[in-house]
Amino acid sequence: MRRFRSNPVAIASVVVILIFAFTAGGTFLLSITGHQWPCNPNLTNLEQKLLPPCPQHWLGTDNLGRDVLSRMLHGASISLTVGLIAVAVSLGIGMVVGAVAGYFGGIIDQILMRAVDALLCFPTFFLILTVVALLGPSLLNIVIVIGLVSWTGTARLVRSEFLTLRETEYVKGARVLGQNAWHIITRHILPNAAAPILVTAVLGIPDAILSEAGLSFLGFGVQPPQATWGNIIADGKTYLLDAWWLNLFPGLAILIASLSFYLAGDALREAAESRS
Amino acid sequence: MISFIIRRLALSVVLLFIISIISFFIVTLTPGSPYPWGELNPKISAEVKANFRKKFHLDRPLHEQYALIMRDLFTGNLRSIKDDRPVMSRILERLPATVALNLTSIVISLSFGTLLGVTAARYSGHWQDALGSFIAFLFIALPGFWITYMMVVALVKGFGVPILGTHSYGIEFPNSLGSGLDTLWHLLLPATILALGGIASQSRYLRATMIESLREDYIRTARSKGLAEEVILYKHALRNSIRPIIAGIGMVLPALIGGAVVIETIFAYPGMGRLGYEAVLERDYPTLVALNFVVAALVLLGNLISDLLSAAVDPRVRLE
Amino acid sequence: MLKIKDLQIGFSTPTGITPALKGVSLEIGRGETLAIVGESGSGKSVTALAITRLLPTPPAVYQAGSITFEGQDLLTASDAELRKVRGGKIAYIFQEPSTSLNPVYSIRSQMAEMIQHHRPDVTDIDAEIIRWLDAVGIVDPATRLHDYPHQLSGGMQQRVMIAMALSARPDLLIADEPTTALDVTIQKQILDKLRELQRDLNMAVMLITHNFAIIRGLARNVAVMYRGEIVEYGESEQVLSNPQHPYTKALIACIPRLGDQRHRLPTIESNP
């Protein structure tokens, strides 16, 4: 912990993440209660279309006259949601698969690991794209699919924890292993694996955010009129040479959000490694 | 050596089998109409639909469909729903472009990744190292399409430079050198953007392995011989550290090909990524199954080649 | 030729600077052999590595003293000048030959590097390498050229290291525990070889060891180190037959002798 706290870059990234989280959360809460700030992200006003940043619209307007800042704030909540839920899904799948493979070993382990190898051969983004396009782009589909293709790292981690543990427990007696399986899992494996799993999770969030952005860009992300950072850029691509702000700000947001998660995750990893 | 290759090929066949099953199921089991025209399109008679189903084996049970598709795939008879041309010929048309793009990207990412990684290790603990890490993460976090557009705006609007496609439209080059350079130029930008992620991850990994290698006794011996620091880094330490990076290149391929989807779309580059995107849009199942298969085969081949290369670099693992 | 005066070196740790050398002074003349004897942690390796600034400087800190080699101050020399001295004038062999050779390059490659760097006048490098490998006692050297370090035994690896170090014709060879990691039977062979080569090349040798027993017949002078200081310094014959310092006496008493009737070998209690 101390190592993490003494790293200025890590602190800065955590601050940015918190800003991001509060913005996203705040916008979400506000929208539930019916309020919008600074204005309605879906309000079109064709007379005001494609305005560069100005006092009334800090980040300009898009091709339908919608305020870019408001749309970006909503995009923040989408991105954060996608990041968190997709990572939760991938952690869940990964932990189960890793536990089963590590606990049972033998043939089951071999089969599961071959499946992992096979999955790794797929171009992940392409796979996500295929499934989402065929299933239909909705928030739920997107997070599930992203989770479905990213669980391999966690699975390997959990599996290796199980494998190392099986060696020591066998000394105590195989029967003990059989009787208290659940106990062993919660008492020994999870605490040891918790730190690297956390690191994997934090590093997985920006991957999910970037995937969603890419999907939105290609038209298969969360659909308009819902605003996501990716589809603001997508909408703006036809007007690219004239309305550069439609590209700059959402992209910058994606970059800064992802970067902070990566830097924080890396600092976390270094702190965890130096402890063990 | 030979037995190693044979074992790997056998393993690859098994993997390809699993992959083909997975991609088949993904493609056929996801709900949605298989017809390229709308499900409820009144202009299409029931008879045409029936013929369509017959032709693409959709009226058979799943495992038969799988077997038939595989047979067609290997005999070259698999046809695209879109234009009824053999799928493999469509894929093979785009293969050289994809290979060119990926190879260039790998070369770029290896060279810059090595430079960045060695420098970070050399100055480990100092500001150059921290800067190197920051740059690495910056590259990973950069959304490819965003930076591409920023560069397009800058280059096209600012400098009037053509960068889309594989050739500059409307410009004739007097000789093959000129047009060759033109092609290279068009290849460079997308390859570089694709390479960013690779540069980042390879430089980080190399930094770690280099730092370990630099602690070894033989580095002290090399120093005691009076060799220059660059020689020690790039000759002695690097060769000991680079094996995992080279072995890992094969695994970078899936990310490259996946990431290429967006890049190729933006640059209007005729590669397999774009082919896949179009196939997804058109729900062209045969193309999708074949494409996944070919890509997986390429990845496995890439893995084999990178493992062989890494053995060439590091004689300690020659006879695995 | 080599003169170390009052060398003080410390190591910086999170809790401050720990002294390693507390004012070490010694001299080696041309063609002479000096043995530095002491336990682990007494500072002998630090002294050896410090001479050509091979100590990694964090964490090592050169606090005071001077090191002069043939009139040149090594502590203030530039990097370029230092690189000429390293290998070309002062060469090293280390304790663990198995890890001191680069595992991914062949013997030939590593030796050629040394020769090319310090003796650009040599035209037939392979012949030169074979000559040196032969001189250190490697059988059939021509067949060994393209071998990798891990294909050689420990004794052979150390011979290669010696050959490599000597091939640049240095004026001083610093041997840091050259036989400690080797089989006892090989130890004698290597030490005999070293003695022979030193005579033939009229080379100075600084032999570092914790084993008093091996210096007889090999080193003319000896310096005994204890906890970063030299506690006794003089001609080996003198010191061995008439040790002054209690530590030296204890060290000599520890040497097992043939025909020794004691059941328990004496040991030294200390905390370096």
Image: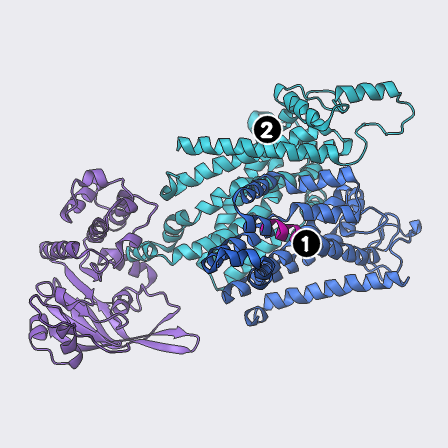
Amino acid under label 1? Val
In this rendering, the count of numbered labels is: 2
Range shown magenta: A90-98
Q: Chain of mark 2?
A: B
Q: Is residue C22 above or below residue A209?
A: below
Q: Is residue B31 above or below residue C222?
A: above
Q: Position of residue B46 (x, y in %)?
A: 88, 21
Quadrant location of residue A81?
bottom right
Is A220 placed left or right of C197 in the picture?
Answer: right
- The residue to which callout 1 is attached is A87
Q: Secondary structure at mark 2?
A: helix
Q: Position of residue B148 (x, y in %)?
A: 68, 45
Same chain for the residues under marks 2 and 1 in the image: no
Residue at 58% x, 37% y: name it.
B102
| Chain C tint as drawn | purple
Mark identifier at residue B217: none
Q: Nearer the viewer, residue A165 or B310?
A: A165
Label 2: how many Cα within 10 Å (few below 14, some 14–19, many 20+): some
Q: Is residue C16 above or below residue C155?
A: below
- The residue to which callout 2 is attached is B96
Q: Secondary structure at mark 1?
A: helix
Amino acid under label 2? Pro
Q: In this orientation, does residue B99 appear?
A: no
Q: Chain of mark 1?
A: A
